Image: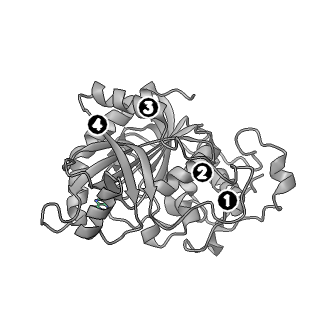
Amino acid sequence: MPSSGDPAGRDRHPGVGTPVGPQKLRAPRPSTPGRSSGGPRSPIDRTTEPRRPRYRARDVNSADPIRPIDQPARLDALEAAVRRRSDLVPELGIVLGSGLGGLADELEDAVAIPFDELPGWPAATAPGHHGRLLLGHLGGRPVAMLQGRLHLYEGNAVGLVVQPVLLFARLGAKAVVLTNAAGGLDPTFGPGTLMVIRDHLNLTGENPLLGPNADSIGPRFPDLTEAWSPRLRHLLHVAGKAEGVEMAEGVYVALTGPSYETPAEVRMYAGLGGHAIGMSTVLECIAARWAGLDVCGVSLVTNAGAGYTGEPLTHAEVLAAGAAAGPRLGRIIRRFVEAYRPA
Ligand code: HPA
């Protein structure tokens, strides 16, 4: 049960200073102390897991390890903070990667919560990442959106990097759409290529599920055979075609960054079966599957992999290509959301 009152002990003014596109923010909900967390809980929560300590945001450093068994208490606090501002139950969670945040402007009736107003979350530091959680409607469907994300390369613990997707599940979402900016390993992928993620190679050296498991969230050994949902991949392709875009499909390779790859590494990762490469997404996928969410995703290829063109890579180029192709991906995701129904 979430505790009442602000876990961070701060005086919050929901929505103030966090406008969402042209729409007006909704008035904040009155606080609902003692409100129970969404969805039925199995009795297992209370019998097999340790008593949840009251979680205090100000005690937390974003690099401190968060084990799977620690997540339920963290999610209690996060859910309570969100529910003080919005009672929207999202069908879908959407993570908007570098330069792709524009879709957030299309949310209707949106409530926006900056990351650093959520217990334990730091402000996003990556350029091109706003760092807000939004709840609202897209194409008439209730969604939660992450405008920006938490990366390993910012020094965040892996357990924190995956909290947004776990929070989506806690708020009621049944599926998640993960987007990112990526380099092209497939030499036929030029800037602007949209790649539906078919599978991934987790080369981050991390796994969010290491340590004692939280059985109330998911199993000890989650299956990843169909980590990237065939049904949702099909829906993405249909949405793309409706927008006149033939999307590619391929394997996303994840590293920690923040340095880009060397040309020799790009050749190696292409040889290992990768088609696009980046610094995010796979850990979120693993955690989302653990929590029972269906997962799909799209990489926006912003540049050819290092060494393919002979030109150096820059983050500015990545952001510019994201800005150029982002609206197209936004339209596709909007169509996807309109067509999506939970399984
Ligand atoms: N490599 C890794 N991450 C990236 C790249 C890249 O070439 N482009 C955008 N994100």
Mark 4 = which residue?
247
Comes first in the chain, label 2 or label 3: 2
Image coordinates for residue 318, horizontal then vertical, percent: 24, 58
Q: Amino acid at mark 2?
A: Leu
Q: Is residue 141 above or below residue 196?
A: above
Could you tell me how far apart the alpha carbons at marks 4 and 1 are, in whole angstroms?
36 Å
Image coordinates for residue 295, horizontal then vertical, percent: 50, 42
Residue furthest to the left: 310
Comes first in the chain, label 1 or label 3: 1
Residue under the point 31% across and 51% down: 275
Label 4 packing within 10 angstroms: few (<14), some (14-19), many (20+): some
For residue 71, which numbered disc appears in the image?
1
The mark lying in front, picked from 3 and 4, is: 4
Contact flag, marks 1 and 2 (Cβ < 8 Å): yes
Give the secondary structure at mark 1: helix
Ligand 1 quarter of the rendering:
bottom left
Q: Is residue 170 above or below residue 49?
A: above
Image coordinates for residue 22, horizontal then vertical, percent: 34, 41
Residue under the point 32% across and 39% down: 330
Could you tell me how far apart the alpha carbons at marks 3 and 4 are, in whole angstroms?
17 Å
Q: Depth check: give the residue in front, 178 or 209.
A: 209
Mark 3 = which residue?
337
Q: Is residue 239 visible?
A: yes
Could you tell me how far apart the alpha carbons at marks 1 and 2 are, in whole angstroms?
8 Å
Does residue 81 appear left or right of residue 312 in this picture? right
Is the residue marked 1 within 8 Å of ligand 1, measured from its CB? no
